[in-house]
Amino acid sequence: QITLKESGPTLVKPTQTLTLTCTFSGFSLSTSGVGVGWIRQPPGKALEWLALIYWDDDKRYSPSLKSRLTITKDTSKNQVVLTMTNMDPVDTATYYCAHRRGGKVGGRPLNWFDPWGQGTLVTVSS
Amino acid sequence: DIQMTQSPSSVSASVGDRVTITCQASQGISSWLAWYQQKPGKAPKLLIYAASSLQSGVPSRFSGSGSGTDFTLTISSLQPEDFATYYCQQANSFPLAFGPGTKVDIK
């Protein structure tokens, strides 16, 4: 059974850096094809994809946030860490990590997410 | 970047109704689309992937269809536990993108 859980601060001040950790079980990020993504959801709004890291350390980012995001993995700890710099009140959201599923077509990876962690609400306020 | 739209934004329906939600991609994505269900205060749950493949454990009253730019999620007979918000997601290329969501509520 695959499970994921997000952890990190619930409150950060504007301009600070947010560090979130996704701790998972039931799979290994050293296995070919495996990936973990981060998605966020502002209160009452839609889902927004942020970043994805693959077993081979390939990393993909949302272009609109790329300059502020860093995703890393620690295979030995079964963890993926997302950092977001220069936090702003508009970054207030529930942040989810999720297990990537999907194969490849023409060498291009397909990516959907299942399952998801429970999410962690991060509020940005002074 | 590929943009996703959904219609309607909300629908009121009764138990037993057939409900159809549409999702449109701004450019062709073949069959690389997923659908998720999200209940209040909960994480999204994968229902459909590759446009029409039912995720394990998902009731057969859920079905998906479409390819290219136009996709549909159908609930054949709405059940009380199906009242939720539904999101589509293009899985074809980066950046990945979700639709704005369709809320299904009780009529």
Image (tube, rainbow, N blue to C red):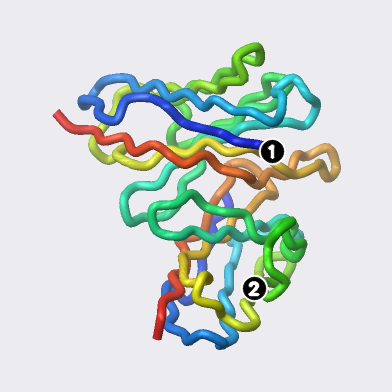
Picture quadrant of residue A67: top left
- B9 vs A125: above or below: below
Image side of residue B84 versus residue A98, left or right: left
In this orientation, which residue lies closer to the viewer: B102 or B93?
A: B102
SS under mark 1: loop
Q: Which residue is mark 2?
A: B72
In the rendered structure, which amino acid carries the disc numbered 2? Thr
Disc number placed over residue A117 in the picture, else none: none
- Quadrant including the C terminus of chain A: top left
Picture quadrant of residue B68: bottom right
Q: Is residue A68 in view?
A: no
In this orientation, which residue lies closer to the viewer: A111 or B16?
A: B16
In the rendering, at what x and y percent does residue A97 appear? 52, 36
Q: Residue at x 61, y 60 (%)?
A: B35
Q: Residue at x 21, y 25 (%)?
A: A13
In the rendering, at what x and y percent does residue A29 appear? 70, 23
Q: Which residue is mark 1?
A: A1
Q: Residue furthest top?
A: A76
- A31 vs A3: above or below: above
In this orientation, which residue lies closer to the viewer: A121 or B4?
A: A121
